[in-house]
């Protein structure tokens, strides 16, 4: 995995957004693996900016999101809603081409991705505990799409989006680590001091205690880190 250092989140958003916009221009039927959360927001804004300016056509793009909450009582916090707001409603994507894992049939997601030809580019954030998708520490590296119990750390990190900690779902359905690593290109975004320990662990040993470390020796993976997230590497 290559580590690319950038000054701040805005710079990362521009560079990663340009990579994705250029990919869609070159291959209009690209298959994108997408993430939610704070990390990809600047990237989505850049994609939208480029799409508007250059009339980039997203009508044939196919997307597979990393994860979705199970039984999310607050409909405004579903990851589908997040993606509508930050990307899907802002480009001419065909919503029928946008996919989220289904808690009723998690195992089918890997088949659907394979049927679509596999993921060309997978976007990732990283949790403060090293999770990618909702693959919490000690998830096997060979895992496929599955249901997870969220750790208290992840629930409290995500409580900022909900009215209270009690409203944060306790379960999610996520692509597994083997699902993620099958992508032909992987870009992980990490910004802020809160991610610095996880980034250091990710680069140290390939060990299930840090799920993101599954990418350590992956030649198709790059981590874009700002100065704060890269604190222990610089
Ligand atoms: C979101 C996801 C998570 C987040 C991670 C970081 O789809 O899969 O792994 O990428 O929790 O979240 P942020 O970017 O909000 O710090």
Image (cartoon, rainbow, N blue to C red):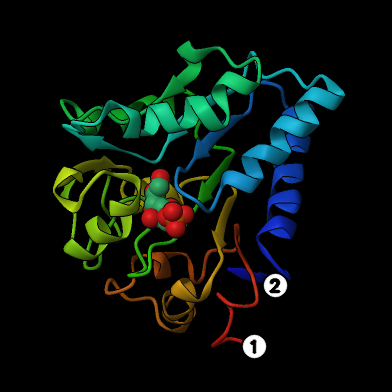
Residue 118 place in picture, x, y as percent:
49, 34
Give the mark nearer the N terminus: 2 vs 1. 2
Q: Nearer the viewer, residue 188 or 179?
A: 188
Label 1 C-beta lies within 8 Å of the nearest ligand 1 atom:
no
Q: Residue at x 25, y 67 (%)?
A: 137
Image quadrant in which the N terminus is located: bottom right
Instruction: Report the residue marked by disc 1.
Output: 234
Residue 52 drawn at (x, y percent): 79, 23
Q: Which residue in the structure is indicated by mark 2?
A: 5
Q: Residue shown at 33%/43% (left/top)?
A: 175
In the rendered view, tell whether residue 55 sits above or below residue 46.
above
Determine the secondary structure under disc 2: strand
Q: Secondary structure at mark 1?
A: loop
The answer to whether residue 113 of the structure is visible from this angle is no
Query: How far, Cα to Cα, is label 2 from label 1?
Result: 9 Å
Q: Residue at x 65, y 20 (%)?
A: 91
Residue pictured at 23% horizontal, 65% vertical: 153
**Residue 38 locus on image (x, y percent):** 50, 51
Image: 6 above or below 87: below
Residue 217 versus residue 24 in the image, above or below = below
């Amino acid at each position: 995995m290559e580590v690319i250092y950038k000054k701040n989140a805005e710079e990362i958003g521009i560079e990663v957004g340009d990579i994705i916009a250029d990919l869609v221009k070159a291959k209009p039927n690209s298959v994108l693996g997408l993430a939610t959360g704070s990390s990809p927001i600047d990237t989505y804004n850049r994609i939208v900016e480029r799409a508007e300016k250059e009339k980039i056509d997203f009508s044939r793009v196919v997307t597979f999101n990393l994860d979705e909450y199970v039984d999310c009582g607050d409909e405004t916090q579903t990851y589908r809603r997040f993606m509508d707001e930050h990307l899907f409603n802002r480009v001419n994507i065909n919503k029928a081409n946008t996919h989220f894992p289904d808690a009723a049939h998690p195992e089918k997601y890997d088949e659907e991705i394979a049927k679509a030809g596999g993921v060309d580019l997978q976007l990732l954030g990283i949790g403060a505990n090293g999770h990618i998708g909702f693959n919490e520490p000690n998830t096997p590296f060979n895992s496929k799409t599955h249901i997870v119990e969220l750790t208290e750390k992840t629930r409290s990190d995500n409580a900022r989006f909900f009215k209270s900690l009690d409203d944060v779902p306790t379960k999610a359905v996520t692509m597994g680590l083997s699902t993620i690593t099958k992508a032909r290109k992987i870009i992980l975004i990490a910004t802020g001091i809160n991610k610095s320990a996880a980034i250091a662990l990710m680069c140290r040993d390939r060990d299930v205690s840090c799920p993101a470390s599954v990418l350590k020796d992956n030649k198709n993976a790059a981590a874009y880190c700002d100065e704060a997230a890269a604190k222990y590497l610089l």
